[in-house]
Image (cartoon, helix red, strand yellow):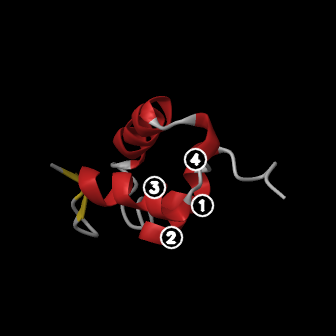
């Protein structure tokens, strides 16, 4: 399903960005994808998607800041 119509960003692209970037920082991921940079209507849904993905992602994958 599309989350950001302006940029054509789907839920799958957000999920892929979370796992490929190994990051749980919503601002970083949304900025990298360009989500919310036009009309901003999608930001709430995009953040909701990010939170759902982070809830399902193993802690080791989400938190790379403490790894040497």
Left or right position of 44 against 32: left
Comes first in the chain, label 3 or label 4: 3
Question: Which residue position holds label 4?
Answer: 61
State the separation of the CA atoms marked 3 and 4. 8 Å
Q: Give coordinates of residue 63: x percent, y percent.
A: 68, 45
Question: Which residue position holds label 3?
Answer: 19
- Residue 53, picture quadrant: top left
Q: At 47% across and 38% down in the image, what residue appears?
A: 57
State the separation of the CA atoms marked 1 and 3. 13 Å
State the separation of the CA atoms marked 2 and 4. 19 Å
Question: Which residue position holds label 2?
Answer: 32
Image marks 4 and 1: residues in contact by CB distance under 8 Å:
no
Give the secondary structure at mark 1. Answer: helix
Image marks 1 and 3: residues in contact by CB distance under 8 Å:
no
State the separation of the CA atoms marked 3 and 2. 14 Å
Mark 3 Cα within 10 Å, few/some/many (few <14, many 20+)?
Answer: some
Nearer-the-camera pick, 64 or 49: 64
Q: Which mark is residue 28?
A: 1
Comes first in the chain, label 4 or label 1: 1
Image marks 3 and 4: residues in contact by CB distance under 8 Å:
yes
Nearer-the-camera pick, 42 or 18: 18
Nearer-the-camera pick, 47 or 21: 21
């Amino acid at each position: 399903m599309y989350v950001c119509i302006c940029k054509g960003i789907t839920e799958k692209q957000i999920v892929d960005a979370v796992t490929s970037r190994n990051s749980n920082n919503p601002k970083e991921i949304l900025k990298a994808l360009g989500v919310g940079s036009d009309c901003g209507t999608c930001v709430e849904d995009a953040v909701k998607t990010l939170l759902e993905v982070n809830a399902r992602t193993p802690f080791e994958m989400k938190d790379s800041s403490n790894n040497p």
